[in-house]
Amino acid sequence: MFPKPTKKEKKGLLYSGKRLSPEEALKIVQATPLLKRTAMKRTPVSPLKRAKKKADTAFALYIRNRDNKCMLAGLDNVRCGGGLQCMHLRTRGVYILRFDEVNAMAGCAGHHVYYTNHPSDWDHLLQEFFPERWAYIEEHKNEEAHYKLSDYQELERFYTRLFEGIM
């Protein structure tokens, strides 16, 4: 694509019309502020986000241990595989249902990935095999919830105690 450099071109670098040695070129590159590497600063995680993550983790652990198997195994043609995960029937973005036990079940990674990418199939499966849960979710999905730091902390404590009660 580009012509091979000649021996003279290999020996130096052209910079502002004058030829530089490789050492001189390196000094210029190192002295150029835009080319220097800078350390990335970590943005601190807010206490609210940290508490939400802890509550999510405690809830997911409880659900996986409550069900203790893929709840969708044998209900469809999707092959079970991978570790057990907490699957929300309606997305976690619906805050009123985020920590609702009716809105969650344990499922394998295979089912979780498949139904995350095929939401219409997910809706049909829920309506067919889990009609009570589907009705409950449809009834409550438009309600609002606003969690505070203390709410997330209490949810974490609650689901941790429930999980410890199972074990």
Image (cartoon, helix red, strand yellow):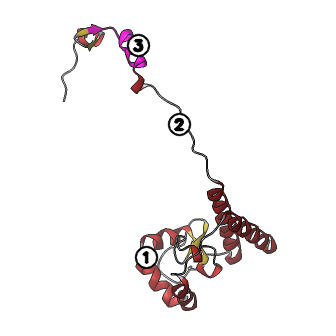
- Is the Cβ of the residue at disc 1 closer than 8 Å to that at disc 2? no
Query: Could you say which disc has been placed on residue 40 in the image?
Result: 2
Precedes in sequence: disc 3 or disc 1: 3
Q: Position of residue 82 (x, y in %)?
A: 57, 65
Residue 153, image quadrant: bottom right
Q: Which of the 4 image quadrants contains residue 72?
A: bottom right
Q: Which residue is mark 1?
A: 119
Q: Position of residue 165 (x, y in %)?
A: 81, 74
Q: Residue 161 in the image: x percent, y percent?
A: 79, 70
> 160 or 152, which is in the foreground?
152
Specify the amino acid type for callout 2.
Met
Q: Position of residue 101 (x, y in %)?
A: 65, 79
Label 3 secondary element: helix
> Of label 1 and label 2, which has the lower sequence position?
2
Residue at image x 22%, y 17%? 5
Tell me if label 3 and label 1 are in contact, CB under 8 Å: no
Tag in front: 1 or 2:
2
Q: Secondary structure at mark 1?
A: helix
Label 2 SS: loop
Seen at 21% across and 13% down, the residue is 6
Q: Which image quadrant: the N terminus? A: top left
Q: Is residue 167 above or below residue 46?
A: below
- Look at label 1 and name its amino acid: Pro
Locate residue 6 relative to residue 146 in the image: left or right: left
Q: Are marks 2 and 3 in contact (CB under 8 Å)?
A: no
The C terminus, quarter of image: bottom right
Extent of the magenta region: 19-32
Looking at marks 2 and 3 on the same chain, the residue that comes earlier in the sequence is marked by: 3
Residue in the image at 42% along x and 23% along y = 33
